[in-house]
Image (tube, grey):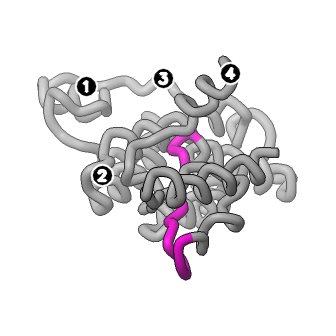
Amino acid sequence: MEVVGTFRIFEKSLIKRDLQYTEYYGSKGFLQVKDIYGENSVTKLECIGHIQKRVGSHLRKLKKNSKRLGGKGKLTEKFIDKLQNYYGFAIRSNVECLEKMQSAVIAAFFHCCSSNQNPMHGQCPTGKDSWCKYKQALCDGKVYVDKTAGLSNSVIKVIKPTYLALCDKEFLKKGLHDMTQNNNESFNNVL
């Protein structure tokens, strides 16, 4: 139903309003409309929330396929949610610049994985306004005590390639628009 509706909206836009849509936010129906005004005339952009969810999906799949990753002090559901949330925050905070976005996403990974025994805050932003409490404490001349367990180097080594694949510039470009499908979905739900 969504695919047919999408096609009709795009088709009528040219006939009734002399308007061409250039961007499409969504997952279903894109293949039906990407060439509607000419070859590759419509660009697919993804909802930031969907981009963020991929972190959780990829890490859960990795955990399921590798028995050594599960358990206490390893890759738990709570830790995956934490990584996913920090990833989303890094994207939303840097929609104006792809390089800053990529740097923030990578910094978020190491920040989440760090502990008192293994601090990894080298890429976190510095200063009093930093989202990293470790860097805030350094700026104030205080000692920060990290209460989180972090991850062991062996677990980090296994999950790092999966996470860094989600930091690829081509993938992150999809989030530069700072848009979400939630407004459309809420409106459609009311109708």
As drawn, 98 above or below 190: below
**Is 163 included in the stretch rendered in magenta?**
no
Q: Are the residues tagged 3 and 2 within 8 Å (C-beta)?
A: no
User: Which amino acid is tagged 4?
Assistant: Leu
Indicate which label's residue lies in the foreground, 1 or 2.
Answer: 2
Q: Residue furthest bottom?
A: 39
At label 2, which amino acid type do we have? Answer: Gln
CA distance for labels 3 and 4: 47 Å
Asked if the residue at tag 4 contacts the one at tag 3, i.e. Cβ–Cβ closer than 8 Å, the answer is no
Between 28 and 177, the one lying in front of the other is: 28
- Label 1: how many Cα within 10 Å (few below 14, some 14–19, many 20+): few
Q: Which residue is mark 4?
A: 191
Nearest to viewer (mark 3 / mark 2): 2
Which labelled disc corresponds to residue 147? Answer: 3
Q: Amino acid at mark 3?
A: Lys
Disc 1 is placed on an element classified as loop
Q: Is residue 11 left or right of residue 88?
A: right
Residue 45 on the magenta span: yes
Closer to the N terminus: mark 3 or mark 2? 2
Query: Magenta segment, which residues?
Result: 37-49
Query: Which of the two labelled residues, at mark 1 and mark 4, occupies the earlier sequence position?
Result: 1
Q: Amino acid at mark 1?
A: Val
Residue 162 in picture, x, y percent from top left: 63, 62
Q: Residue furthest top?
A: 190
In percent of the image, x 66 and y 28: which residue is there? 188
Whether residue 124 is visible here, answered yes or no, is: yes
Which one is nearer the viewer's eye here, 53 or 7? 7
The circle drawn on residue 143 is 1
Q: Earlier in the sequence, mark 3 or mark 4?
A: 3
- The residue at which mark 2 appears reads as 123
